[in-house]
Structure formats: structure tokens, C-alpha cells
Image: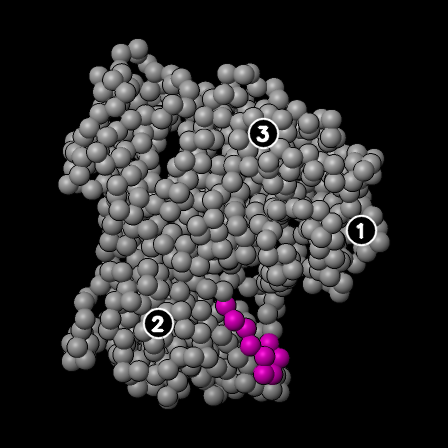
């Protein structure tokens, strides 16, 4: 049959006729409800000609393309056996160019994308617009392998794909690649993905898609600061608000592989999956390997359309949906390792004064931890620093009306630690391997290691009223199995959450080195970067939020002089930049002036007032005429309320910058526009547009989007936050 799944303006048409591996005939804009004869006609018209110097039949790009089909591009499956093994040389040869066939009767389709695997029932097709799922099984008897594939089109138009490879032979089966491969049309000829550095994550890279493979592989054992994050193919010049795009994201926190390919034969593809090292996954007889989900999104309205789908989908299963994201104060850049109740008392008092709701004690609280070169792994409270334990601190924080949170880094260990001395066999890799930040990785697959960590975390959470764990991960693996380690940390986090369901967990990895939809399923917040420099954070949040909704993105107000860059920023710029996320503070407020504390208190009050909108609305980014200007905001689902930031990141290209266009509003409504009071904003001239000095203006939504609103001449590294309400 030919199956048509539709949802939220997206169509997926899969040809599963006969015994050939099913093929996606169309993944893109909704084609509407098509009758069976129309689907048959589309399939017939989709058969290409036979190109010269090629196989003698039309090339059919399936959902699991291999050499056995005549596909000479990157295959979906690569596996191997020892020719001398029990299955013999014939099975080994068959795996070099597998000939997979659809198992008769294995296709199952449902119109409910949330139905579990065991509940799928066969139907005659799904042509409504509420999404659906499609599952089928492939087999190569000669190679003794079987693949179960599942595709889900969610009600938000997000496509999820995963595979399960089973070894049906009598000899071990090595897995080299098992990946998602999806077709994209020829017009998707431009690519955007990301790279970055520590404290400068998710820098976009744009290039054209030519013949050959553009591949982005992560070998860090975590995503890494240079993680490709999201690979987007689109029509030339696509932006935030324009162009047609197709995007993939691998929802996995270990090594990943994402690629775009244009074959010289014509077809173009996007692919993604877990990156497996040789010998990393070897299946014994009867064993199976299941891939992580590859998340794929089509948009006909640029990158913002990708965000719309992903944010709505994440919010449909999010553990924090509807739960207010508290104002957090983290102690790291305030006191570093200088811990004591006396040292922290002024900070607690200042946090109470400005309206902080969660106080997080960072690194330095545990046994022997006086600097970053020792004691990781010794997760007991340091009796010298805290002679009465953490109890008095927790009580003082609670008395100030705040929740208490704690920093941990369970996956790492210092060589100079009691744990490493007691269990050297738990250290990943070899003794001569280089350290990273003076620490090694704790092998969570070693017998007893994960159990020990759970016992320590469980004891801490049972003894103290801890509402929140900041779970850090400060180095690459550089050894061992990324697959096994990532699976083990997922299991550990799941176990901690099951035992303590009220505790929230933040994923931090020396900043933003582990931000993906795999870790997001298990955590309540991510730390996009170790930098609190607002100039750098503007871009980091702009692009991290393509995938991750703002309510997950920790956004902290830092000190005037940034810890990571040494750059000094206006308080209003720091406040404006930290408003659009899960807001917090990483600044020693005990050293702030009364005027600064009053400004921070006004800011936290505005955040609490606006967070129902900030954390549920539609994220909108303008394609500004001047690249030095960032215009982005959040618009309520009914478009009655919006908050936008207008930031000058550098010097304007013109003495009089163009009026700021504000997209995403209701064109038929009139909005009252006013600037939030986040402190003095530095401008080039004292003269402002009359509406700004008047305090507000009423302006039609259509005019705001098309004509734009004149703004004060902002000096570089300044921002204005606008609130817009239907008048």
C-alpha cells in the first residue's frame, strides 16, 4: 500500500507496495487528503528515468538505502561478520551489499502518533491531518539480519524515525551504521548547521549543498561545544521567517553523525544517527540494537517554522509544562570555592531582597574540594567547611523563602580522590591517558560504579530537602564506549528521577556541550553556555532555541565584567538578555549597590509577571536588515500579547538605522507598545523617537510587521525590551 500521514501542514507519503523496502515519495508541505487512485498516480509519476552509466532499472531511494539497491551514497545500514564465523563467508558477503525485503504483512499504520508499538493495528491508510505512525519489518535471510523501522508524524508535524536491528544468525554481528536517511528535493540546495567553542557555542555555518557528502560527526562522547546540533537544508537564502527548510536532529547525548548528500545521480538526502566506533556494538545471536530517535522537521516558513513545530512537540510531553520556572541564583561566579555559611549569608540576604526563588550551591561543598584538581567523586559533605553539614544552610535558604539546589558531577572523578584510590578500575581508559580539567571519566559500565553513584545521590537527596540538582559533565570521554556510557548515564538519571520524582535536574556540560533532545527527555533545564556575557549569549540563545524551548534555557544575569570574556556590559543589557529564558543570577549580589539591587528586583518581578507568556508563546525572530541588530520575541498563541527584545550587538550600518519590523503579530489588531523599565539604556544621541519619550504608542499589527517602528539610536551592546498588548 501507499500510506499518507498528515499533520500540521506536513505530508509524509510512503510507498510500501510489494516486497521492496518502503520509500518516502514525499516529505514536505501538506498535499491534502488524497484518494487511493491519486496516491497510485503520484507513485507512478515519481519513477525516474534510468541515467547513463547506472543500474539498468530506475533508482529507487528507499528508507534503508544500501549498495544492494544500487545506492552508492551513504547507506542506512552497514554491518559485518567474520567470514570464518558460524554463518560463513556467504553471510559476510551478503552484508557488504544487503538485499533487504519487506516482510509480508509487517506494515502497520495508525492515525494516532502516540500509540505504543505493541498497540499498532493495521488500517487501510491514514489520510486525516492529525499525524500517525508507520511501522514495518525488513529482512535479508542470506545475511541473517532483520530491521524493524518505525516512523511517527506527530500532531505538531514533527517526524521521528528509529530502527531496531536484530541478529538472526548464529555468529556475532557487528554494527557499523544504522541510520535514518530521508529524501529532500533538489531545491533544498543550501545548508546551515553549527559549530562553536567553549563559551561560544552554536555558531551558524552556511554553505551550499554540492555533489558529495557534507558530514558532521561528533566524537566527544557527548555533543561537544562544536556540535552540529541541527542540520538544515533549505531553499537558497532561507532565513528565520522565509524559505522552505528540511532539518534533522539526532536525539542522543553521545557520539552522533549527521549528513547531507547530493548524489551525482540526482537524489539528495539528509541523514542522521548514532556514530558507532568499530566493534562498539556487536550483537550476539538473537540480540538487537535500537537506534536513538532521529527528529526531522519540514517548514515552509523558514527556521521559525522549525522552532514552532519542535517547541509545540516538546511542550506536549515536557515534564515542566505549566510549571513556573523559578528565578535561580547560582553561587559559582559569586564565591567560587569559598564556601561557608558566613560567606554565603550576605548573598542569601541579597537574593531574598531581589526575589530569587531557588538558591543553588555550586562546586566546592564536598569532601576535600578546595580547588578543581581534586576530590571529584567524594560525594560527602566536607566536615571542615560545613561542620554541621548542609542542614544549617538549607534551613537558612528555606527561611528566606527559596528552594535549595546543589551542584554535582557524577560522571567524573579526580585521580586525587578517595573514590579513585579505592576503585582505580572504575576510571575509564588507561592510566597514561591525558586528564582533562584535572579529571577522568568514571566508567558507569564498570561493575558497581553506577550503583555507588546512585547510593550517594540517593543519600544526599534523602537527607536534605534538595529541590534541584545541577548535573555537570566537564570533559570529553576520549576513550571507552560512548554508546555504553551514554546508555548508562541515561539509566542513572532515570533511576534518580524515579526515586526522587520531585527533584528537578539541570543538564550542564562545561556549559552547552550536551544540549540535545535525548537529554531533554530526562532533565528540566539545560545550561546553554558557561558564558554570562550578554553579547555572546544573545547569539547562543538565538540558535539554541531553534530546537530547545526557552523555558529550558538557563539565562543568567552575570556581573558587570564577564567572567569568560572580560567584557563589561551595561546592567540593562544584561537584564534584557537574561529575561528570555529560564532566568537566573550568577553574580555576587552582596557587592551590588542599592540601586542595582532595586533594578534586579524590578527585573525579577517583570520576569515572574511575564513568564507565563515567555514560556508558552511562539518564539519569533526577525530577519533584520542590519545584521548588527537582533530582533526576537515571544508572541502569545492568541497573538494578544507579546514581548520583544531589540538588541544592538555592534555598530549600525547607517547613521539612522531602519525602523524595526516586528513580525508574528495579528495584522488586524492594534497594539499598545511600551518599553520595559530595565534600567538606563545607552544611546548614540539623546534625541529619541517621540513615541518612546511619550512612554507608549498604539500601532497596527500589520504596520508593525511591514513598516516597522523607529527606535532610539542604541549604542552597541545595548537592548530595549518592548511589551505589546492588544489595545
Residue 653 visible here: no
Q: Nearer the viewer, mark 3 or mark 1?
A: 3
Q: x, y percentage for residue 646? A: 33, 29
Q: What's the residue at 39%, 43% (across, down)?
A: 612
In contact (CB < 8 Å): disc 2 and disc 3: no
Where is residue 359 shown, x and y percent of the image?
A: 61, 36
Q: Residue at x 47, y 48 (%)?
A: 323
Q: Residue at x 69, y 28 (%)?
A: 344
Label 1 crowd bin: few (<14), some (14–19), many (20+), radius 10 Å: many
Give the image quarter of residue 198: top right
| Residue 387 coordinates in the image, percent (x, y) | 82, 36
Badge 2 is on which residue?
112
Q: Nearer the viewer, residue 98 or 257?
A: 257
Identify residue for label 3.
Answer: 352
Whether residue 611 is situated above or below residue 57 in the rendered picture: above
Front residue (pair 403, 270): 403
- Measured along the vertical axis of the image, is residue 104 above or below residue 606? below
**Is 288 colored magenta in this rendering?**
yes
Q: Label 1 belongs to which residue? A: 419
Amino acid at each position: 500500500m501507499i500510506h499518507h500521514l498528515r499533520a500540521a501542514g506536513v505530508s509524509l507519503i510512503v510507498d510500501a507496495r510489494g516486497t521492496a523496502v518502503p520509500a518516502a515519495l514525499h516529505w514536505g508541505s501538506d498535499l491534502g487528503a488524497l484518494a487511493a487512485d491519486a496516491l497510485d498516480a503520484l507513485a507512478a509519476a515519481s519513477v525516474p528515468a534510468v541515467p547513463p552509466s547506472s543500474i539498468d532499472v530506475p533508482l529507487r531511494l528507499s528508507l534503508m538505502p544500501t549498495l544492494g539497491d544500487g545506492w552508492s551514497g551513504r547507506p542506512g545500514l552497514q554491518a559485518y561478520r567474520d567470514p570464518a564465523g558460524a554463518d560463513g563467508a556467504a553471510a559476510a558477503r551478503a552484508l557488504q551489499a544487503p538485499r533487504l525485503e519487506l516482510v509480508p504483512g509487517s506494515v502497520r499504520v495508525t492515525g494516532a502518533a502516540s500509540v505504543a508499538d505493541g498497540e499498532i493495528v493495521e488500517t487501510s491508510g491514514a489520510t486525516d491531518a492529525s499525524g500517525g505512525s508507520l511501522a514495518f519489518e525488513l529482512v535479508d535471510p542470506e545475511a541473517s539480519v532483520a530491521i524493524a523501522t518505525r516512523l511517527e508524524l506527530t500532531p505538531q508535524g514533527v517526524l521521528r524515525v528509529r530502527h531496531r536491528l536484530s541478529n538472526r544468525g548464529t555468529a556475532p554481528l557487528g554494527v557499523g551504521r544504522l541510520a535514518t536517511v530521508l529524501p529532500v528535493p533538489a531545491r533544498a540546495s543550501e545548508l546551515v548547521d553549527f559549530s562553536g567553542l567553549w563559551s561560544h557555542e552554536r555558531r551558524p555555518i552556511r554553505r551550499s549543498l554540492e555533489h558529495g557528502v557534507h558530514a558532521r560527526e561528533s566524537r566527544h562522547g557527548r555533543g561537544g561545544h562544536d556540535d552540529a546540533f541541527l542540520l538544515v537544508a533549505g531553499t537558497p537564502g532561507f532565513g528565520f521567517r522565509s524559505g522552505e527548510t528540511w532539518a534533522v536532529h539526532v536525539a542522543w547525548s553521545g557520539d552522533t553523525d549527521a549528513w547531507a548528500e547530493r548524489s551525482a545521480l540526482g537524489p539528495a538526502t539528509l541523514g542522521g544517527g548514532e556514530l558507532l566506533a568499530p566493534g562498539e556494538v556487536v550483537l550476539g545471536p538473537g540480540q538487537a540494537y535500537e537506534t536513538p530517535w532521529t527528529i526531522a522537521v519540514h517548514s515552509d516558513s523558514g527556521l521559525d517554522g522549525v522552532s514552532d513545530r519542535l517547541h509545540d512537540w516538546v511542550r506536549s510531553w515536557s515534564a515542566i509544562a505549566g510549571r513556573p520556572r523559578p528565578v535561580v541564583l547560582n553561587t559559582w561566579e559569586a564565591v567560587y570555592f569559598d564556601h561557608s555559611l558566613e560567606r554565603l549569608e550576605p548573598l542569601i540576604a541579597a537574593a531574598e531582597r531581589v526575589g530569587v526563588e531557588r538558591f543553588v550551591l555550586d562546586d566546592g561543598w564536598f569532601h576535600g574540594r578546595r580547588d578543581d584538581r581534586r576530590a571529584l567523586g567524594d560525594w560527602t559533605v566536607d566536615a571542615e567547611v560545613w561542620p554541621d553539614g548542609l542542614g544549617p544552610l538549607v534551613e537558612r535558604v528555606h527561611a528566606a523563602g527559596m528552594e535549595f539546589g546543589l551542584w554535582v558531577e557524577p560522571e567524573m572523578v579526580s585521580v586525587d580522590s578517595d573514590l579513585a584510590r579505592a576503585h582505580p578500575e572504575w576510571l575509564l581508559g588507561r592510566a597514561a591517558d591525558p586528564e582533562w580539567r584535572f579529571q577522568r571519566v568514571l566508567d558507569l559500565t564498570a561493575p558497581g560504579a553506577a550503583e555507588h553513584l546512585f547510593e550517594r545521590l540517593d543519600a544526599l537527596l534523602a537527607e536534605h530537602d534538595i529541590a534541584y540538582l545541577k548535573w555537570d559533565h566537564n570533559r570529553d570521554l576520549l576513550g571507552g564506549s560512548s554508546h555504553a556510557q551514554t546508555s548508562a548515564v541515561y539509566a542513572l538519571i532515570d533511576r534518580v528521577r524515579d526515586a526522587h520524582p520531585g527533584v528537578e535536574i539541570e543538564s550542564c556540560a562545561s556549559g552547552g556541550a550536551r544540549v540535545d533532545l535525548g537529554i531533554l527527555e530526562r532533565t528540566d533545564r539545560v545550561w546553554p553556555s558557561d558564558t554570562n556575557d550578554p553579547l555572546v549569549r544573545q547569539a547562543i540563545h538565538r540558535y539554541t532555541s531553534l530546537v530547545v524551548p526557552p523555558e529550558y534555557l538557563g539565562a543568567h544575569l552575570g556581573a558587570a565584567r564577564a567572567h569568560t570574556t572580560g567584557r563589561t556590559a551595561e546592567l540593562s543589557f544584561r537584564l534584557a538578555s537574561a529575561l528570555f529564558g529560564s532566568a537566573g543570577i550568577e553574580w555576587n549580589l552582596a557587592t551590588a549597590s542599592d540601586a542595582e539591587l532595586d533594578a534586579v528586583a524590578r527585573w525579577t518581578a517583570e520576569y515572574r509577571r511575564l513568564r507565563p507568556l515567555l514560556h508558552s508563546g511562539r518564539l519569533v525572530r526577525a530577519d533584520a536588515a542590519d545584521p548588527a541588530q537582533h530582533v526576537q520575541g515571544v508572541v502569545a498563541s492568541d497573538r494578544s500579547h507579546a514581548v520583544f527584545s531589540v538588541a544592538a550587538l555592534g555598530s549600525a550600518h547607517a547613521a539612522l538605522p531602519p525602523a524595526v519590523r516586528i513580525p508574528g503579530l495579528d495584522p488586524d489588531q492594534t497594539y499598545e507598545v511600551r518599553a520595559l523599565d530595565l534600567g538606563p539604556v545607552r544611546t548614540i544621541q539623546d534625541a529619541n523617537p517621540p513615541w518612546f519619550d511619550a512612554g507608549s504608542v498604539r500601532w497596527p499589527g500589520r504596520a508593525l510587521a511591514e513598516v516597522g517602528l523607529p527606535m532610539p539610536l542604541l549604542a552597541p551592546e545595548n537592548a530595549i525590551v518592548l511589551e505589546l498588548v492588544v489595545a
